Image (cartoon, grey):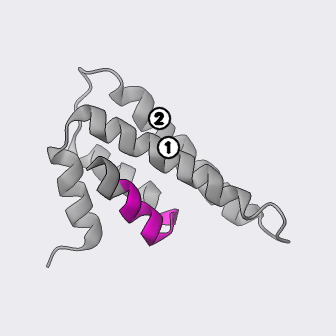
Amino acid sequence: MMTGMDALQMKLLQAPREAVLRFIVSGIHSLTIQARSFYEEADSSSQLLDINEAIHRLSGHLRDLIDAQEPLSSSRIAGITANLTLMPVGELARIEERYL
């Protein structure tokens, strides 16, 4: 049985590179917005740390994939989607619908 993340990974593998890059950038932007929601909360450091690490990894994928010679492998796609699991499901679906 295919999960939602499996379906997303398939879409990313089949999408044009420009769409994948836009998808990643939108994910990074959404994560920065999500991080802002933790600014006023006590004991928010672990949530902010998790989001910062996801942004770091996603920006690394983006940096690498700007090079058209860099392969968009299934393991890279798995890494991208794993870091987007911190996003609210509805926001991830909105970005997926817009770019993929």
Q: Position of residue 48 (x, y in %)?
A: 70, 58
Q: Is residue 4 left or right of residue 79?
A: left
Element assignment for label 1: helix
Most frequent secondary structure within the magenta stretch: helix
The one nearer the camera, 74 or 16, is 16
Residue underneath mark 2: 60
Element assignment for label 2: helix
The one nearer the camera, 77 or 33, is 33
Q: Kindly give the residue lying farthest to the front in the view shown.
A: 98
Distance, label 2 to label 1, CA atoms, is 5 Å
Query: What residue is at 29 percent from the left and 39 percent from the top?
Result: 19
Query: What residue is at 29 percent from the left and 32 percent from the top?
Result: 18
Q: Position of residue 5 (x, y in %)?
A: 29, 66
**Residue 70: quadrant of the picture:** top left
Query: Callout 1: few (<14), some (14-19), or many (20+) C-alpha neighbours within 10 Å?
Result: some
**Residue 62: quadrant of the picture:** top left
* Label 2 close to label 1 by CB (< 8 Å): yes
Disc 1 marks a residue whose amino acid type is Arg
The magenta stretch is 85-95
Q: Position of residue 66 (x, y in %)?
A: 36, 24
Q: How many marks?
A: 2
Disc 2 marks a residue whose amino acid type is Gly
For the N terminus, the quadrant is: bottom left
Query: Callout 2: few (<14), some (14-19), or many (20+) C-alpha neighbours within 10 Å?
Result: few
| As drawn, 6 above or below 66 | below
Query: What residue is at 39 percent from the left and 55 percent from the top?
Result: 95
**Residue 37: quadrant of the picture:** bottom right
Q: Is residue 45 left or right of residue 47?
A: right
Residue underneath mark 1: 57
